Amino acid sequence: MALPSQKPNEPLGDEILQDWENIGSGGFGDVYKARHKDWGFDVAIKLLHRGVCPSASLWIEAEVMTRASCDCVLRLYGTYKGFPRGGEPMQEGLVMAFMERGSLQSLFDKLHDPLLWPLVCRLAHQVAVGMNFLHQQDLMHGDLKPCNVLLDDHFNAKLADFGLSRVSTSCMSTSCMPTEEKTGYLQGTYKYMPPEAFDSSYHPVRAFDIYSYGILLWSILSGKEPYPCSFSISYAMKYHDSIYFPHNIQPPTPKKIDKEGWNELVNLMEQCWDNDPSKRPKFKDSLETTEAVFSQNRDGIPDAVCQVEKAFRGVVQHLFQKMKYRAD
């Protein structure tokens, strides 16, 4: 996938990118924001930490993003090859759309309150749309959680970070998982994994993503992360060569609110996190619920977006005042 100014399969180089800024780091790599001189807008560039993952995983992720290209998936512009910010050695990466609003996780962190209901309904539906499209292409995401749901200027959801994506019939045993995944370094991942996935002989199927979506729905409804911070340490323990995870562990149902579609989304959430994978609904079936609930609340989206933008400005002003106070 390439824009007109980029030849197919030709990576972008340092001569066309400027104003590099690190905007995120994780166990696998770093994400930078940079300005494309010719296109006239900012892009996001994902670079893997050297020695953590083979570079081939980037091209697998690029292939998945291309196959899963739709309105609810982060857009891939092309690839990068160069020396970021003048550093050594040469690195390769993915060039993607830059999401000014960050992730669903960063939205939770800034607001500290449940999201406005129309926005809840739209996010629930857009994530389901993106995941259904992925599954229709015989692909799995493998790491669905708030920090991998990015937001555009109007808080529309875009699925991102396909580093653990696989063709749905492939094997992803613990032996081929990155070290950080096995040790618990990426604690958030465990919170969204189904109980059966902690068996070392488990071969992922689409029901894995559906369970993750159920826990993600809980986060969208409640506006926060599930489970206490110690969850990954106390419940996802290394046990010989496998990981033990007790069954029947789901977060408590969020406090009910009197909104149209609340019961339907809660029922869908509980179906998705059923401990029996065969009882979890397919995304195609889930869309009937999420689309109906979103349609009932669609008219409230403009006002909800406006209110969230005001809250964002308030957070920025508060942080500016704190910085100014410290400077003084």
Image (tube, rainbow, N blue to C red):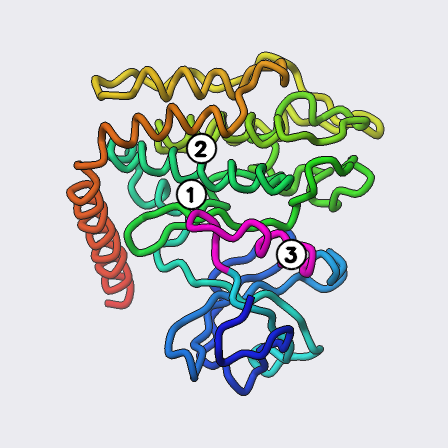
N-terminal of the pair, mark 1 or mark 2, is 1
Residue placed most toward the observer, 177 or 142: 142
Assign a secondary structure to mark 2.
loop
Give the side of residue 314 with respect to residue 286, left or right. Answer: left
Give the side of residue 160 with respect to residue 217, left or right. Answer: right
Image position of 301 with respect to 74: above or below:
above
N-terminal of the pair, mark 3 or mark 1, is 3
Residue carrying label 3: 63
The CA distance from mark 2 to mark 3 is 30 Å
Label 3 or label 1, whichever lies nearer to me, is 3
Disc number at residue 204? none
Q: Quadrant of the N terminus?
A: bottom right
Q: Residues within 10 Å of mark 3 (few under 14, many from 20)?
A: some
Residue carrying label 2: 225
Residue 60 magenta: yes
Q: Amino acid at mark 3?
A: Glu
At 58% from the left and 32% from the top, the residue drawn is 209
At 38% from the left and 23% from the top, the residue drawn is 289
Q: Position of residue 325 (x, y in %)?
A: 23, 61
Q: Position of residue 125 (x, y in %)?
A: 38, 34
Residue carrying label 1: 105
Q: Amino acid at mark 1?
A: Gln
The CA distance from mark 1 to mark 2 is 8 Å
Q: Tell me whether circle 2 and circle 3 mark residues in contact (CB < 8 Å).
A: no
The CA distance from mark 3 to mark 1 is 26 Å
Looking at the rendering, the stretch of residues picked out in magenta corresponds to: 58-75
N-terminal of the pair, mark 2 or mark 3, is 3
Assign a secondary structure to mark 1.
helix
